[in-house]
């Protein structure tokens, strides 16, 4: 299909397409550059092709509410390849020397020039932080995803920019922004396991395709050529290879990310319809794509995140948790924004669609779309905290790279993880289950559901959830590289820029501690309103350990630690009982609704 951004000359007579064979991996998908069948020089006027890097164009991104955001934004710069647009005509007096050159020779010269542009760009790959990261054969598979030694996008991408420890480049109203974020509510949990229905948890499935996988033609329902109303998307009609049996995420968004290792593109689709088998047509509502060696920005009109950034960036993958290193910024979704957008978001400065005012709330001191937050802890402070190692891994990522507000959500706020359905839909084991076992996360439903409650992670003061108050709003100049250069100081050294695993923190002698275990039982009642109103109660028992710094050897200090352990166990037991009660209430409501429907049908 002819790329929509290339104008076809009205006086161009039909010709047999001239195609050029390029070696595998040297050119992106057909929607990235003009097909040679569209290069149609007609004497005496020949269209000259000019390589350009930016244009202004309307862009549309989907929104959870179903309405598109329309704005004007600069067309992102691509890495290694530009975009081709028709420039002014070349008249006969602009041609080179020989006046008797045939149309065929001119076409051959033009084809050779175009081939040179395409071939000189080497196949792209994401950044590998350590030698020997690539698997045997050089391609990842559905069964072998990359570990923490691999991350998408270039070292200069906003996702991979390292921050200073307790970075001084903060916004003047940083404290008020963080306070407003916390006013939305407590952060949502990270969840692992197949769940009760077997679909698992997580927001974005990631599939690594190979040249032998089935090929699909993308059809976007909101593309104007398919009767949609969101404009023309260059991904419509593109050919994408996807592993057999791949399925989108559960929920309303139905995300799917396909990393094409042959071409170097990440294809990111929104509201994909059904499981994919045998090739054919891949139907979705909208989508974008991004170079895996680029800046992490979608290069087609629109995006599957509100910020315009690639949804591949910032996703927490279970392989990273298992290996103890998350070498990139984190994907943050929050309830609403202040109605503006800042770097690294690529949308216009106005973001009214996601504003708090659209939800009946005030925009005052709310974070902007694209806002980067940092956890204000040093490596030494994190290393000295009496918390499990997986908590320290997450905290180091928030301190080294931060959290980028990329989308909005009905929930207060949460971090996005890889969806386990990208393994379970293919009949493969879920590494998130292995992580949950190693981390000893709370489980229920017979071990099918494990949860990591971020709201219970302690801060430096040891209080559950206090780390959320230690976040800091970083100046957007850090993300776009426009901050003035600061004089180096001994008190605020920079972490190594780009690459390399998270540096090990120096050993800090821990204060004397006393640890006490306790077991408590709690009862909770939960009420649900959908599909009908129902109430249920449940009782649960939980054991927990708590530690307290010992400032003396008296019995009073140990009694204080025991009291803290019992309080923690009681809280944990009550949380488990509340979750169990909610599940029971939901099941009871479903049965009641079904009984009512059956009775109404019988009447």
Image (cartoon, helix red, strand yellow):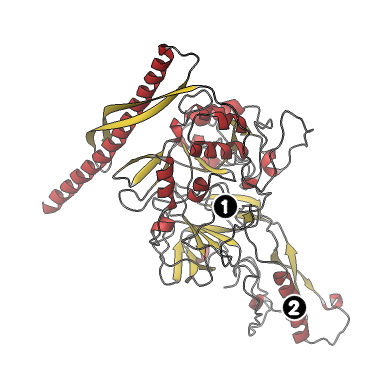
Can residue 339 be seen here? The reply is no
Look at 63% across and 50% down and name the residue there. Answer: 72
Look at 13% across and 49% down and name the residue there. Answer: 599
Taking 71 as reference, is 459 above or below it?
A: above
Q: Residues within 10 Å of mark 2 (few under 14, many from 20)?
A: few
Instruction: Tell which of 236 and 146 is nearer to you.
Output: 146
Q: Considering only order in the chain, which callout, 1 or 2, is on the residue closer to the N terminus?
A: 2
- Left of 514 or right of it: where is 346? right
Q: State the image coordinates of residue 37 (x, y, percent, origin top left).
A: 64, 78
**Quadrant of residue 450 within the rendered picture:** top left
The Cα atoms of the two marked residues, 2 and 1, are separated by 33 Å
- Label 2 sits on a secondary structure element that is helix
Q: Residues within 10 Å of mark 1 (few under 14, many from 20)?
A: many
Q: State the image coordinates of residue 137 (x, y, percent, origin top left).
A: 57, 67
Quadrant holding the N terminus: bottom right
Instruction: Tell which of 149 and 186 is nearer to you.
Output: 149
Which disc number belongs to residue 112? Answer: 2
Q: How many marks?
A: 2
Whether tag 2 and tag 1 are in contact, CB under 8 A, the answer is no
Which disc number belongs to residue 385? Answer: none
- Left of 586 or right of it: where is 349? right
- Left of 298 or right of it: where is 596? left
Look at 41% across and 19% down and name the residue there. Answer: 561
- Label 1 sits on a secondary structure element that is loop
Residue hosting label 1: 310
- Left of 537 or right of it: where is 319? right
**Quadrant of residue 422 within the rendered picture:** bottom left
Instruction: Tell which of 323 and 176 is nearer to you.
Output: 323
Q: State the image coordinates of residue 352 (x, y, percent, origin top left).
A: 55, 41
């Amino acid at each position: 299909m002819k790329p929509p951004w290339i104008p076809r000359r009205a006086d161009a007579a039909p010709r047999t397409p001239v195609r050029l064979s390029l070696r595998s991996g040297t050119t992106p998908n057909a929607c990235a550059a003009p097909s040679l069948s569209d290069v149609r020089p007609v004497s005496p006027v020949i269209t000259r092709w000019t390589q350009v890097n930016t244009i202004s164009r309307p862009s549309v991104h989907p929104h959870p509410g179903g309405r598109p955001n329309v704005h004007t934004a600069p067309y992102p710069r691509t890495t290694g390849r530009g975009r081709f647009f028709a420039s002014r005509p070349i008249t006969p007096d602009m041609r080179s020397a020989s006046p008797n050159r045939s149309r065929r020779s001119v076409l051959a010269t033009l084809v050779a020039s175009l081939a040179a542009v395409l071939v000189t760009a080497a196949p792209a790959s994401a950044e590998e932080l350590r030698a020997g990261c690539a698997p045997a054969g050089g391609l990842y598979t559905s069964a072998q995803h990359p570990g923490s030694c691999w991350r998408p996008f270039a070292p200069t991408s906003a996702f991979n920019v390292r921050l200073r420890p307790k970075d001084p480049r903060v916004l003047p109203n940083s404290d008020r922004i963080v306070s407003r974020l916390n006013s939305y509510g407590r952060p949502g949990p990270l969840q692992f396991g197949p769940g009760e229905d077997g679909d698992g948890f997580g927001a974005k499935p990631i599939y690594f395709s190979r040249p032998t996988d089935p090929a699909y033609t993308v059809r976007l329902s909101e593309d104007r050529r398919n009767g949609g109303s969101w404009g023309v998307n260059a991904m419509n009609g593109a050919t994408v290879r996807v592993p057999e049996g791949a399925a989108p995420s559960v929920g309303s968004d139905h995300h799917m990310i396909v990393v094409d290792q042959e071409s170097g593109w990440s294809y990111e689709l929104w509201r994909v319809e059904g499981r994919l088998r045998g090739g054919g047509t891949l139907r979705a509502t909208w989508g974008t794509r991004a170079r895996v060696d680029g800046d992490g920005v979608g290069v087609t009109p629109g995006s599957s995140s509100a910020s315009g950034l690639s949804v591949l960036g910032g996703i927490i993958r279970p392989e990273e948790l298992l290996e103890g290193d998350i070498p990139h910024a984190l994907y943050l979704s929050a309830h609403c924004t202040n109605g503006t957008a800042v770097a690294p978001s690529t949308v216009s400065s106005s973001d009214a669609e996601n504003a708090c005012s659209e939800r009946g709330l005030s925009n005052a001191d709310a974070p902007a779309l694209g806002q980067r937050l940092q956890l204000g802890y040093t490596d030494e402070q994190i290393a000295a905290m009496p918390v499990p190692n997986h908590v320290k891994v997450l905290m180091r990522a928030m301190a080294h790279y931060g959290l980028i507000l990329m989308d909005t959500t009905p929930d207060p706020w949460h971090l996005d993880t890889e969806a386990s359905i990208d393994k379970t839909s293919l009949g493969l084991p879920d590494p998130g289950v292995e992580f949950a076992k190693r981390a000893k996360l709370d489980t229920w439903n017979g071990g099918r559901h494990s949860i990591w409650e971020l709201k219970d992670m302690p801060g430096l003061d040891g209080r559950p959830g206090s780390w959320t108050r230690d976040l800091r709003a970083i100046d957007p100049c850090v993300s776009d590289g426009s901050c003035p250069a600061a004089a180096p100081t001994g008190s605020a050294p920079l972490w190594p820029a780009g690459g390399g695993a998270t540096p090990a923190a120096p050993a800090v002698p821990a204060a004397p501690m006393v640890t006490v275990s306790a077991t408590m039982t709690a009862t909770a009642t939960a009420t649900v309103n959908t599909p009908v109103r129902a109430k249920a109660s449940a009782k649960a028992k939980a054991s927990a350990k708590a530690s307290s710094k010992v400032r003396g050897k008296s019995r009073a200090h140990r009694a204080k630690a025991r009291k803290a352990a019992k309080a923690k166990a009681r809280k944990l037991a009550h949380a488990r009982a509340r979750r169990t009660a909610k599940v029971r209430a939901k099941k009871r409501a479903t049965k009641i609704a079904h009984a009512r429907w059956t009775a109404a049908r019988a009447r």
